[in-house]
Image (tube, rainbow, N blue to C red):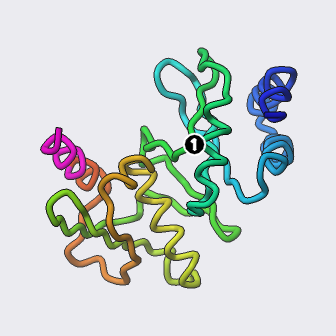
């Protein structure tokens, strides 16, 4: 992929430098431009790294199953992770939910304000998300915010494995905080080896 040629030639260094200089516009411009060449429907984010890497570059199909193979090929072509960067084609769970924000529809949402109601049916879970920011969003954006919240809590791979249904809720009654939901999902995963 041309993206990885760019990344290894100059991109990783340019992105790291822009991040060190807190130049978010340059980061967005560089990554968005290069990833648009892979496919314009892909979505990217930077996250805390895993397994010894400081940062993670995450590129996902943005909920479009037709783009899953494109994102997967992008990740499989990636160079090996190092002390600075690792790469993923699924949203990673946030290490610290109190500092996690998601950007959607030109707004920034504090993930820690969300609450979850969960209904377990065997190895499948239906969830409803309450967040005070849902009221001002259209139906599609509300569903996307809910999906991004759950991805932040347990990671996209766990969502694909365990979550059957996600929807928005206008009621906070009967909900749990995000750490409690994460614990619930960890217990469920451990019960199915």
Position of 145 relative to 80 (above/below): below
- Is residue 175 left or right of 122 when viewed as pictured? right
Magenta region, residue range: 184-193
- Work out which quarter of the rendered image holds the N terminus and state it: top right
In the rendered image, residue 72 lying in the magenta stretch gets the answer no
**Residue at horizontal 56%, vertical 62%?**
63
Main SS, magenta region, reads helix
Compare residues 170 and 156 and report the one nearer the observer.
156
Q: How many marks?
A: 1
Q: Quadrant of residue 104?
A: bottom right
Disc 1 is placed on an element classified as loop
* Image x and y of residue 178, in percent: 32, 56
Residue 31 sits above or below residue 84 on the image: below
Q: Is residue 147 left or right of residue 22?
A: left
Q: Which residue is mark 1?
A: 89
Which residue is located at x 16 percent, y 44 percent? 192
**Residue at the spot 38% in from the left edge and 70% down from the top edge:** 166
Q: Quadrant of residue 66?
A: bottom right
Q: Position of residue 80 (x, y in %)?
A: 61, 19
Residue extending furthest top? 83
Q: Is residue 189 magenta?
A: yes
The image quarter in which residue 191 lies: top left
Q: Position of residue 183 (x, y in %)?
A: 22, 47
Please identify the quadrant where the C terminus is shown: top left
Where is residue 7 shown, x and y percent of the image?
80, 27
Q: Residues within 10 Å of mark 1 (few under 14, many from 20)?
A: many
- Location of residue 179 with respect to 53 vertically, above or below: below
| Residue in view at x 24 percent, y 50 percent | 185
The one nearer the camera, 25 or 43, is: 43
Position of 17 compared to 173: left or right?
right
């Amino acid at each position: 992929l041309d993206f990885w040629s760019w990344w290894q030639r100059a991109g990783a260094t340019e992105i790291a430098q822009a991040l060190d200089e807190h130049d978010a516009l340059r980061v967005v411009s560089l990554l968005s431009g290069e990833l648009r060449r892979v496919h314009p429907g892909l979505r990217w984010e930077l996250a805390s790294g895993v397994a010894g890497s400081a940062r993670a570059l995450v590129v996902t199909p943005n909920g479009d199953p037709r783009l899953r193979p494109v994102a997967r090929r992008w990740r499989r072509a990636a160079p090996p992770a190092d002390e600075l960067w690792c790469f993923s084609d699924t949203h990673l769970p946030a290490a610290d939910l109190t500092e996690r924000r998601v950007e959607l529809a030109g707004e920034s949402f504090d993930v820690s304000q969300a609450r979850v109601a969960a209904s377990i049916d065997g190895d499948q879970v239906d969830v409803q998300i309450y967040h005070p920011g849902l009221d001002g969003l259209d139906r599609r954006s509300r569903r996307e915010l809910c999906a991004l919240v759950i991805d932040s809590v347990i990671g996209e791979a766990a969502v694909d494995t365990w979550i059957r249904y996600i929807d928005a809720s206008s009621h906070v009654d009967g909900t749990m905080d995000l750490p409690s939901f994460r614990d619930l999902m960890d217990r469920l995963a451990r019960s199915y080896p």
